[in-house]
């Protein structure tokens, strides 16, 4: 069992930056790769970013590429998502996700989800 706890969401204005955090805990948490998805009202959950613990190699989805940076602290089993130049269409619940050993951008392959953190961007 892996527990994921997100933090850092909130209400911001368009053009602002925001950093989300996700801390993983639980037995065998180190075997899971962490990443971020988001879900806007009325839309499917979509992949945002992930990072490979072994080589710090990031991967990004198309939705926010160029405006987000993912980083991680392996010792603390924590990942961060720095989001820049936020737009109203970035308004969504951002979810931390854990997948066993490899990471797929497809939601059915996620083994554990966090509860999500709301990000609201005003125009």
Image (cartoon, rainbow, N blue to C red):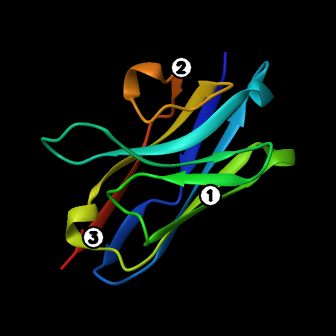
Real-space CA distance between mark 2 and mark 1, rounded to the nearest whole angstrom:
19 Å
Residue 38 lies left or right of residue 81; in this view the side is: left
Does dot 3 land on a helix, a strand or a loop?
A: strand
The mark that comes first in sequence, 3 or 2, is: 2
Label 1 environment density (alpha carbons within 10 Å; few <14, some 14–19, many ≥20): many
Give the labeled residue for mark 1.
80
x, y percent for residue 45: 29, 38
Q: Residue furthest bottom?
A: 15
Residue at left offset 54%, top offset 23%: 112
x, y percent for residue 110: 49, 24
Give the labeled residue for mark 2.
111
Residue at left offset 87%, top offset 46%: 75
Real-space CA distance between mark 3 and mark 1, rounded to the nearest whole angstrom:
19 Å
Q: Nearer the viewer, residue 59 or 78?
A: 59
Residue 57 lies left or right of residue 118; in this view the side is: right
Label 2 environment density (alpha carbons within 10 Å; few <14, some 14–19, many ≥20): few
The mark that comes first in sequence, 3 or 1, is: 1
Does dot 2 land on a helix, a strand or a loop?
A: loop
Q: Quadrant of residue 102?
A: top right
Q: Which mark is residue 121?
A: 3
Image quarter (top left, top right, bottom left or bottom right) of the C terminus: bottom left
Real-space CA distance between mark 3 and mark 2, rounded to the nearest whole angstrom:
29 Å
x, y percent for residue 100: 64, 22
Does dot 1 land on a helix, a strand or a loop?
A: strand
In front: mark 3 or mark 1? 1
Q: Nearer the viewer, residue 44 or 58?
A: 58
């Amino acid at each position: 069992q892996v527990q994921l706890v997100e933090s850092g969401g909130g209400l911001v204005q368009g053009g602002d930056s925001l950093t989300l955090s996700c801390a993983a805990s639980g037995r065998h948490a180190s075997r899971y790769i962490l990443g971020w998805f988001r879900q806007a009202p009325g839309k499917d959950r979509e992949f945002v970013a992930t990072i490979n613990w072994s080589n710090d190699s990031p991967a990004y989805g198309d939705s926010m590429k160029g405006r987000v940076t993912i980083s991680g602290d392996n010792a603390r089993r924590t990942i961060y998502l720095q989001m820049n130049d936020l737009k109203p269409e970035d308004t969504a619940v951002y979810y931390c996700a854990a997948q066993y050993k490899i990471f797929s951008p497809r939601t059915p392959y996620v083994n554990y989800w966090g509860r999500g953190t709301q990000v609201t961007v005003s125009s």
